[in-house]
Image: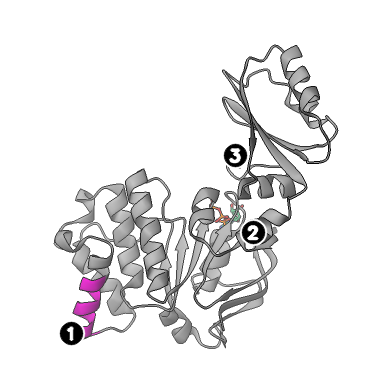
Amino acid sequence: MNVLEINQLTKKFGDYTAVDHLSLSVQEGEIFGFLGPNGAGKSTTIHIAASLLSATKGEISIMGRNIAKHGRFAKGAIGFVPQDLAIYENMTAYENVHFFAGLYGLRGAELKRSVMEALEFVGLSDRQGGFPKNFSGGMKRRLNIACAIAHKPKLIIMDEPTVGIDPQSRSYILNSVKKLNRMGSTIIYTSHYMEEVEEICSRIAIIDHGKIIAEGTKAELKAIITNQKSISIAFRSTEGVPIDQLKSIVGVNAVEAAEQSINISSAVEINNLNRIIQLLVASGAEIRGVEAKEPSLETVFLTLTGRTLRDE
Ligand SMILES: Nc1ncnc2c1ncn2[C@@H]1O[C@H](COP(=O)(O)OP(=O)(O)OP(=O)(O)O)[C@@H](O)[C@H]1O
């Protein structure tokens, strides 16, 4: 069964089209990754799916019911973890979760039990009486998650839940996502960190400029680029590296530059490595290493759009 179905969704802000005839479906039991650079339209799409924003055009159904007609049902079926923390600093951790779970109609002993279970789940039960202002960034993110899951929603939508936190909290959150999924929730996970999406998601949609540009399992997405190789070259500094000239070498499809490295996506059948190295040596760039890399979702994105996921 499809837990979420989006059909030809369009959202305009004035003249600007943030989401452009976007369709996708998420099946029960999936961890579905929604991957795209900043500004691609991920948040707008999931805000509409969570009934927090209205669509300009298109239809959305949750477990077969149109959200425009079954608003109450749709809201109860979804747990939404927003990108910007939605917690009250002047309420304790317990009171925060209690407040949000109460909004979903839980009452009495069931409400108390659900609040404690959610706090336990995110590892904050021993801090239930603490105020978020005394919490670390990672703890606040975990509390944000507890607020969204206490009512045991069928579908949990997470909008970049690991932005700006330390690696330990990030790994805690990623493990929690997997555990929630094992416990029966379907998850939509949006991110512009492709490593996270590769690690936890069973199916992925890549979005750019409000449109889905590729969709499938990791293997299916990588199959798009089996005719591509990825070469990573390290430098002391990439200043002065002739990027435009590299792009004009036969076979090269895209070049992505960071401070001390460049990634080149190039056609497998064309042996242009000599030409690439010659050009770099002639430019005076100090090469520190050359490595052929396994294609990643980053390579898929780079190949499809000519841009990197991160520098938008
Ligand atoms: N309320 C608004 N008014 C005008 N433009 C908006 C509004 N909300 C979003 N946009 C624009 O719509 C586009 C898509 O934004 P959205 O937040 O959905 O992207 P995103 O993929 O979630 O990126 P991010 O990771 O930065 O949140 C952006 O160009 C953004 O500036």
Name the residue located 26 percent from the left edge and 47 percent from the top edge. Answer: 136
* Amino acid carrying mark 1 in the image: Ala
Distance from disc 1 to disc 3, alpha carbons, whole Å, reads 49 Å
Q: Residues within 10 Å of mark 3 (few under 14, many from 20)?
A: few
Which image quarter is the C terminus in?
Answer: top right
Residue occupied by mark 1: 109
Q: Main secondary structure of the magenta part?
A: helix
Type of amino acid at the residue the image marks with label 3: Asp
x, y percent for residue 219: 64, 59
Write down the residue under mark 2: 219
Q: Residue at x 49, y 62 (%)?
A: 189
The CB of the residue at mark 2 lies under 8 Å from ligand 1: no
Q: CA distance from mark 1 to mark 2?
A: 46 Å
- For the point 72% across and 14% down, which residue is it? 281
| Magenta range | 107-117
Nearest the viewer among 32 and 210 is: 32
Q: What element does badge 1 sit on? A: helix
Quick one: SS at disc 3? loop
Circle 2 Cα neighbour tier, 10 Å, few/some/many (<14 / 14–19 / ≥20): few
User: Which comes sooner in the sequence, label 1 or label 2?
Assistant: 1
For disc 3, the marked residue is 311
